[in-house]
Image (cartoon, helix red, strand yellow):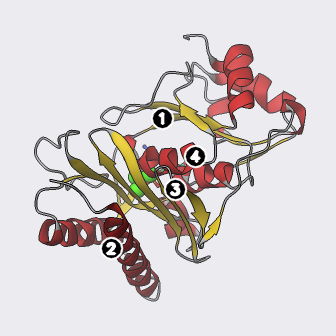
Amino acid sequence: MSVDWLELEKVATNWVYEAGHKIKKTLAGPIDIESKSNPDDLVTEVDRAIEAFFYEKIQEAFPEHYFLGEEGISDEEPSLDGTVWIIDPIDGTMNFIHQKQNFAISVAIYHNKVGMIGLIYDVMRDELFHAHRGKGAFLNGAELPPVKERPLHESVIGLNARWVVEETNPYRNPLKALVRDVRSIRSYGSAALEMAYVASDRLDGYLSVQLSPWDYAAGMIILNEVGCVASNFQGDPLSLTDSGTLFASKPHLHKEIISIYIGEEY
Ligand code: 2AM
Ligand code: CA
Ligand code: CA
Ligand code: CA
């Protein structure tokens, strides 16, 4: 069955705005918070409710589509053949809880493993980054130009400082050297937004030692449209089923950082 991508993009965009509105409304009252894998790995009732909102909308409108979300609503065996929605209802949950800003909704639609539509919505700033495969990437409707490179020593990189000090992190030393050599480091705390910032030239690159498909599925599609590259630290393609390292950046810088700093297996 053929898919009307323009219609799908319109519908997905409307749902993202609707979800953003729902999230904003919750900020007025108390929010129930729980820990997941460790005391700092947080989830709220809002993360779960927003994931359920998307799942129900998609089930109703497109029952033949698959669904993969961070908070556990997934089809039993989400297939990568056919059309699959990969959704992080709130990316940057810690920011959502502590700052009530600097978080995003991330929605990606893949078709037979190819990223077709990517949406990253910064709810509180009302900034929607979106991309449609082959048709470009946009910020609030304005097309993002192909990225321009800067030399490494003038580059600003997104990175969580924790990974540079954590004794058990095998990438500690390569990341230390990278932190030393670039112009500066930023830590925004939302992988989706940091990837959108690389695509829109607010950052030159972004690295994370541990992310999952819902963290980067939409970001990859947006980056691809402006000529950026997203891979693991070895430069291999990212998985849509497994977690791992992520390095997103402008293409020349991508090659340079992998070859000098992070590309070796540790
Ligand atoms: P999340 O807020 O959706 O959990 C924080 O540096 C970034 O890493 C966020 O994008 C966060 O997504 C993501 N992340 C992935 N795994 C995480 C984990 N186990 N604990 C905290 N953040 C995680
Ligand atoms: Ca999480
Ligand atoms: Ca996430
Ligand atoms: Ca999340």
> Is the residue marked 1 within 8 Å of ligand 1, measured from its CB?
yes
How far apart marks 4 and 3 lie (CA) works out to 12 Å
Q: CA distance from mark 1 to mark 4?
A: 19 Å
Q: Earlier in the sequence, mark 2 or mark 3?
A: 2
Q: Position of residue 94 (x, y in %)?
A: 51, 60
- Tell me the residue that label 4 is attached to: 223
Q: Is residue 208 above or below residue 235?
A: below
The mark that comes first in sequence, 4 or 3, is 3
Does label 4 point to a residue whose CB lies under 8 Å from ligand 1?
Answer: no
Q: Amino acid at mark 1?
A: Gln
Left or right side of 210 for 196: right
Say whether disc 1 or disc 4 marks the residue closer to the N-terminus. 1
Q: Secondary structure at mark 4?
A: helix
Tell me the quarter of the picture where residue 29 sits. bottom left
Label 2, on which residue? 11
Residue at image point 89% right, 39% down: 154
Q: Which residue is mark 1?
A: 210
Lower position in the chain sequence, tag 1 or tag 2: 2
Depth-wise, is mark 4 or mark 3 nearer the camera?
3
Q: Is residue 28 above or below residue 13?
A: below
Label 3, label 1: how far apart the Cα atoms are: 30 Å
**Residue 7's spot in the image, x, y percent?**
32, 70
What's the distance in space between the residues labelled 2 and 3, CA to CA?
17 Å
Element under disc 1 = strand
Q: Is residue 132 left or right of residue 263?
A: left
Q: Earlier in the sequence, mark 3 or mark 1?
A: 3
> Can you tell me whether the CB of the residue at mark 3 lies under 8 Å from the nearest atom of ligand 3?
no
